Amino acid sequence: MKLLFRKLKTFLDTIESQIAFYPTLIAIVGCLFAFTMIYLESLGVSKYLRENLPMLVLDNEETARSLLSVFIGGLISLMVFSFSMVMVLLNQASNNFSPRILPGLISNRKHQLVLGIYLATLLYCIFILVSIEPTADKDKIPGFSVLISIILTVFCLAAFVYFIHSISQSIQINNILEGIFRTSKDRLTAIVNDQKTYKDKFPDTTEWHSYNSNRSGYFQNIAMDALLGIAEEKDTKFKILVAKGNFVLHGVPLFSTEKELDEETVKDILSTFIFAKGELIENNYVLAFKQITEITVKAMSPGINDPGTALNAIDYLTELFAIRMKKEDTSIHSKDEKLLIYQASISFEELLYNVMASIRLYCKHDIIIIQKLMVMFRFLHFQECADENYKKSILNEVRTLVDEANNNLTNNRDKETLSKHLDFFNIDIKEG
């Protein structure tokens, strides 16, 4: 049951990131509301209001038809313009920043809700227009439903103003970076708060039995409760061989076990692994480092040449690395104090190297960016860390960055500035 719930949640997370998800739901609500109003009109709601509150209903068939026709045409134009604005936003973000941030922009709920309101109102007006029958009887004219369409259209105009404001904010790189940072920070903080320290060590897994993946895709998540239950039931331990977020090919070793398992049990275990066609920061914080790094690299590329954006991105990387230093490289899951599952994860050293390897390529000639990176390393050097080896990794990256900078900086003053930043680390290296 828990496994089914996990898979359902993963499926919902996947479709929720699609741009058509919320508009489709709201459009369905609009259709249901239209049918409800048509049913109420058949019960005489407009007739009742015409007798008691005549100012709330229309009593002219042609006026009602004309209004609804104008609303339908106007809303179609509004929708076309709004969808065009979304496409321009996505194209500009992809060209100027990184294609990897597009899923986050597409899944923006505010824009989806606005587009859904347009679609729901449009369908409502269409159904109400179709329901108007040629008649001379004023009591059969759906005057109250037309009044509702007027209110909804005015609401759509207000939503359009909000949409223009929101989309102009969304394209700003500071807001994009802030959104990526907040999502990854929440994910990392939750992992750090949930991690436990164990006195016992996980046994050596060299001679364990390995099993291959039965499908391909991005390893997004795992139904840990179900896998812990299987481990306890079979009295064995597991090692997950692939880190979250990695693309797994069919037939590649996926996990290993202390004891050899039968085919039926292996199928049950494989069903606990959840794959997807894309990556989400909510499930894999490493994706945030990739996205911010790509924005930094794109900003420093000759085609964009935007060092200010690169400086801002490094600030966000600094804070994320500080949080990551509190997390241990190993992820071990237990049940009733018994160590049952060892899950592979990207180490701090590897994560830091991957980020710096990309940034060094485009920033090694820019003393301003190099200074910012040195400030980042100095800040991280003073942070609380789960493993003292993290600081050795930082010093290794300092050495590599300085070597690259010395080979590319031609101005003596730039080299003197770099030496001032390096003095702090030289002292630590000698003492360490």
Image (cartoon, rainbow, N blue to C red):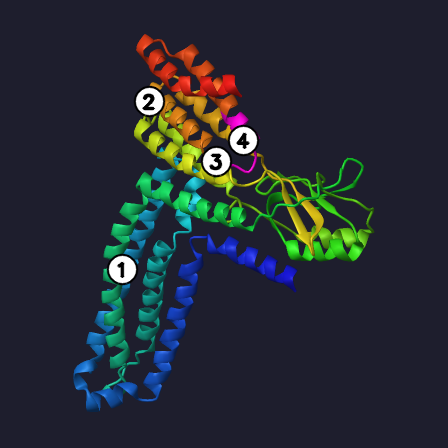
- Is residue 401 visible in the rendered structure shown here? no
Residue beneath the point at 52% across and 22% down: 396
Whether residue 139 sits left or right of residue 338 in the image: it is: left
Q: Residue 171 placed where, x, y %?
A: 31, 43
Q: Residues within 10 Å of mark 2 (few under 14, many from 20)?
A: some
Decide which of tag 4 and tag 3 comes sooner along the chain. Answer: 3
Label 2 is placed on what type of residue? Ile
Distance CA(mark 1)–CA(mark 3) = 34 Å
Which residue is the site of mark 1? 159
> CB atoms at circles 2 and 1 under 8 Å apart?
no
Name the residue located 22 percent from the left edge and 79 percent from the top edge: 61
- Marks 2 and 4, the one that precedes in the sequence: 2
Type of residue at label 4?
Answer: Tyr
Task: Answer with mark 1 or mark 4, whichever residue precedes in sequence.
Answer: 1
How far apart marks 4 and 3 lie (CA) works out to 19 Å
* Disc nearer the start of the sequence (2/1): 1
Residue 99 shown left or right of residue 345 in the figure: left
Callout 4 environment at 10 Å: few (<14), some (14 to 19), or many (20+)? Answer: many
* Of the image marks 2 and 3, the number of the one nearer the N terminus: 3
Marks 1 and 3, the one that precedes in the sequence = 1
- In space, the residues marked 2 and 3 are separated at their CA atoms by 22 Å
Camera-side mark, 2 or 3: 2
Residue 202 location (% of width, % of height): 71, 42
Q: Which mark is residue 390?
A: 4
83 w.r.t. 67: above or below = above
- Is 157 in front, or is 10? 10
- Magenta stretch bounds: 385-394
